[in-house]
């Protein structure tokens, strides 16, 4: 369906943009994930035909999660039994103010082995406690419950991303360049020195170019110590 490919994530992004984001996660972070979802609707509003679903705008779509949003995964025989994903939810407090909070979408298989979705947030009063903020939701396929979690991982969360060597090389180039520039600044900055003159109490020498230094001792001298470039 070309319409699905042009709006693969139900947010206006096409398939190429989804693949670009997934590839970036794979190269930069080392891993990511794709969740196949379907538009939610209240049970009493569920369509009975495909035409009704299309008119209501109900459709499947794919949501991409980067490595940092995948909090936890559990598998049994290569199949996911639990996936916890972090999302950001906007809560409207007034016409002029809104608040963004982190919520956690828990995808798992219930006691009967059916795919279930639940959403949690951190408890405002008890630290490290979570409270469920919606009812258990069971996605359906062909009118029946699903017995697998439609989440697909790419890459490996336990391995370094492909670009990590390039990252370290760039850091090394930056450090070496910073050392060279600092050395050039240090050696290229002349340092004044004076010999044969004893400062009187409260005396301050003015080293600016628009003033002159006058010493009573003819053997006293003042010079700049700087890199000459010889030898």
Image (spheres, helix red, strand yellow):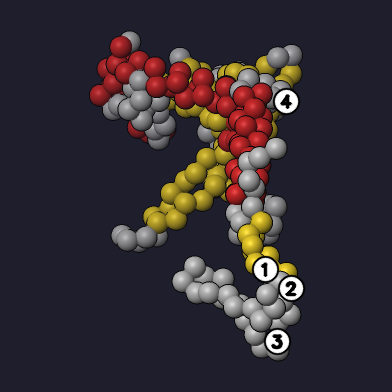
Circles 1 and 4: CB distance less than 8 Å? Answer: no
* Element on which disc 1 rests: strand
| Quarter assignment of residue 69 | top right
Pointer 4 residue = 158
Q: Whole-percent x and y of residue 216?
A: 66, 81
Circles 4 and 3: CB distance less than 8 Å? Answer: no
* Element on which disc 3 rests: loop
Q: Is residue 7 left or right of residue 106?
A: left
Residue 200: mark in rendering: 3
- Residue sitting at 40 percent across and 25 percent down? 9
Task: Say which label, 2 or 1, has the lower sequence index.
Answer: 2
* Element on which disc 4 rests: loop
Q: Nearer the viewer, residue 171 or 21?
A: 171
Pointer 2 residue = 196
Distance between the alpha carbons at the discs numbered 1 and 4: 67 Å
Q: Nearer the viewer, residue 21 or 207?
A: 207
Q: Pointer 3: residues within 10 angstroms few (<14), some, or many (20+)? A: few
Distance between the alpha carbons at the discs numbered 2 and 3: 13 Å
Q: Pointer 2: residues within 10 angstroms few (<14), some, or many (20+)? A: few
- Residue sitting at 66 percent across and 40 percent down? 230
Distance between the alpha carbons at the discs numbered 2 and 4: 68 Å
Q: Nearer the viewer, mark 1 or mark 4?
A: 1
Distance between the alpha carbons at the discs numbered 3 and 1: 16 Å
Distance between the alpha carbons at the discs numbered 4 and 3: 69 Å
Q: Whole-percent x and y of residue 61?
A: 42, 22
Pointer 1 residue = 221
Q: Nearer the viewer, mark 3 or mark 1?
A: 1
Most extreme residue toward the front is 218
């Amino acid at each position: 369906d070309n319409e699905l490919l042009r709006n693969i994530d139900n947010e206006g992004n096409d398939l190429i943009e989804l693949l670009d984001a997934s590839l970036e996660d794979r190269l930069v972070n080392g891993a990511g994930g794709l969740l196949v979802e379907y538009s939610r609707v209240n049970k009493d509003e569920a369509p009975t035909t495909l035409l009704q679903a299309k008119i209501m705008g109900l459709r499947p779509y794919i949501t991409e999660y980067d490595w940092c949003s995948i909090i936890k995964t559990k598998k049994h025989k290569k199949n996911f039994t639990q996936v916890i994903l972090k999302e950001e939810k906007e809560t409207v407090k007034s016409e002029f103010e809104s608040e963004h909070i982190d919520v956690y979408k828990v995808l798992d298989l219930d006691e009967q082995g059916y795919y279930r979705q639940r959403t949690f947030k951190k408890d405002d009063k008890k630290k490290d406690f979570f409270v469920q903020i919606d009812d258990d939701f069971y996605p359906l396929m062909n009118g029946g419950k699903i017995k697998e979690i439609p989440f697909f991982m790419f890459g490996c969360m336990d391995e370094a991303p492909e670009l990590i060597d390039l990252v370290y090389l760039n850091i090394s180039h930056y450090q070496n360049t910073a050392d060279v520039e600092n050395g050039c600044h240090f050696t290229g900055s002349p340092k004044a020195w004076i010999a044969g003159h004893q400062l009187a109490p409260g005396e301050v020498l003015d080293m600016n170019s628009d003033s002159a230094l006058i010493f009573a001792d003819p053997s006293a001298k003042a010079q700049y110590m700087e890199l000459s470039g010889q030898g």
